[in-house]
């Protein structure tokens, strides 16, 4: 990976009237581990896009006089940029972060036979070779699918071969319905003898574990070689956590009783609501997490967006249309089409009432 610092200009004179000082300031401030930056002052010579390789960092100095050219340079750099692989369907932050970073998202086909778990074997070698980052979510949002050890082993082998980093989102790890908790990425790495957790970073939070999404409190763990630059990035681009939030976080992380009670409450809600909804929808108990990923009956016409609009307008129940949680990609149809996501985060009474209304609404539109 190399760092490129570029002063955009529509016109190359062959001589620099004033080469911007920031090029040299940033070059001197670049950590030695990344090597000497490649400097390009386009008043001297136009940028050669072929010098930019996937994974490189490109800094572009833009002001009122060169903004249009700066945009063109950014577009050229993005076209040469990295690929980020993400499951499909997925948590929308993965896609947003990919696009904001100027990378190209690669949507992995999902396998309905495995509760819409990602089909990693569908990704071609040439796509893996361009990949700099892989997003993994286990238990998954919205499907609740959990990755077994063999699947982690496959991803670790791909990471070793192609050098990409695995970002593992594990915020649902403590909401599950079986006797054994879901296998986490760090646990899987340890079991496979990867004690250095190379190219692996795991993320989790109190949001789901303790029902405090507004607290915005969590932690990151994994490969120390990536945690160090992540901490530097977080220092300058993140928001400071107040002392009050820190104390509340310590209390929540230090108590397991409320986590067990929360998990039992979810188990009871799913056990009651899932059979009710199964009368009219294609739905079953997930491996973990607090969502039901349900298919609409053919009589509904397969338009989950219209289904969700009608349900909200007529019965005051909100569900998320599956198409909005997924994308067409890599020759595959949108895996969320004809499905809805339901979050059982309300009280047991409210969940029962919502399920009853969904059943009534589905009967109404399929019998009309």
Image (tube, rainbow, N blue to C red):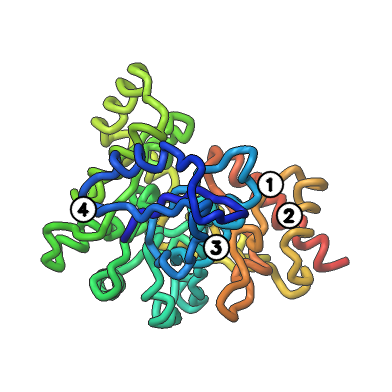
Measure the C-alpha gap from mark 3 to mark 1.
42 Å
* Residue lying at 41% horizontally and 81% vertically, measured from the top left: 126
Report which residue position mark 4 lands on. 223
Q: Residues within 10 Å of mark 3 (few under 14, many from 20)?
A: some
Q: Nearer the viewer, mark 3 or mark 4?
A: 3
CB atoms of marks 3 and 1 within 8 Å = no
* Residue lying at 29% horizontally and 38% vertically, measured from the top left: 232
Q: Quadrant of the C terminus?
A: bottom right
Report which residue position mark 2 lands on. 308
Query: Residue 37: x and y, percent?
Result: 32, 52
Q: Nearer the viewer, mark 4 or mark 2?
A: 4
CB atoms of marks 2 and 1 within 8 Å = yes
Measure the C-alpha gap from mark 3 to mark 2.
40 Å
Q: Nearer the viewer, mark 4 or mark 1?
A: 4
Closer to the camera in the image, 235 or 200: 235
Q: Residues within 10 Å of mark 1 (few under 14, many from 20)?
A: some
Identify the mark nearer the N-term, 3 or 2: 3
Measure the C-alpha gap from mark 3 to mark 4.
32 Å
Measure the C-alpha gap from mark 4 to mark 2.
42 Å
Identify the mark nearer the N-term, 2 or 1: 2
* Residue lying at 75% horizontally and 43% vertically, measured from the top left: 316
Numbered badge on residue 318: 1
Measure the C-alpha gap from mark 2 to mark 1.
7 Å
Is residue 291 visible in the rendered image? The answer is: no
* Residue lying at 38% horizontally and 75% vertically, measured from the top left: 128
Identify the mark nearer the N-term, 4 or 2: 4
**What SS does tag 3 mark?**
helix
Is residue 280 visible in the rendered image? The answer is: yes
């Amino acid at each position: 990976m190399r760092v490129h610092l570029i002063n955009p200009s529509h016109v190359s004179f062959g001589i620099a009237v004033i080469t911007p000082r920031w090029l040299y300031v940033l070059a001197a401030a670049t950590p030695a581990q990344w090597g000497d930056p490649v400097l390009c002052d386009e008043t001297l010579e136009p940028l050669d896009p072929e010098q930019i390789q996937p994974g490189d960092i490109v800094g572009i100095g833009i002001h009122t006089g060169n903004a249009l050219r700066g945009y063109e340079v950014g577009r050229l750099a993005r076209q040469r940029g990295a690929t980020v692989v993400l499951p499909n369907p997925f948590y929308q932050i993965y896609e947003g972060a990919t696009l904001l970073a100027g990378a190209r998202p690669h949507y992995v086909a999902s396998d309905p036979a495995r509760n819409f778990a990602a089909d990693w074997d569908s990704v071609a070698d040439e796509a893996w070779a361009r990949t700099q980052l892989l997003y993994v979510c286990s238990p998954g949002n919205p499907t609740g699918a959990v990755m077994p050890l063999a699947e982690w082993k496959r991803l670790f082998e791909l990471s070793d071969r192609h050098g990409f980093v695995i970002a593992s989102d594990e915020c649902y790890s403590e909401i599950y319905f079986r006797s054994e908790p879901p296998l986490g990425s760090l646990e899987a790495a340890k079991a496979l003898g990867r004690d250095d957790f190379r190219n692996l970073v795991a993320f989790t939070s109190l949001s789901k574990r303790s029902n405090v999404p507004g607290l915005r409190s969590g932690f990151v763990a994994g490969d120390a070689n990536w945690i160090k630059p992540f901490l530097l990035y977080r220092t300058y681009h993140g928001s400071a956590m107040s002392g009050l939030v820190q104390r509340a976080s310590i209390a929540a992380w230090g108590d397991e009783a409320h986590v067990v009670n929360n998990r039992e409450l979810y188990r009871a809600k799913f056990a009651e609501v899932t059979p009710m909804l199964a009368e009219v929808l294609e739905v079953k108990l997930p491996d973990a997490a607090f969502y039901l990923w349900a298919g609409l009956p053919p009589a509904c016409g397969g338009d989950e967006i219209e289904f969700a609009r009608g349900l909200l307008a007529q019965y005051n129940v909100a569900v998320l249309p599956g198409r909005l949680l997924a994308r067409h990609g890599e020759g595959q149809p949108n895996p969320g089409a004809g499905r809805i996501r339901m979050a059982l985060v309300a009280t047991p009474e409210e969940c029962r009432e919502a399920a009853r209304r969904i059943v009534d609404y589905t009967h109404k539109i399929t019998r009309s």
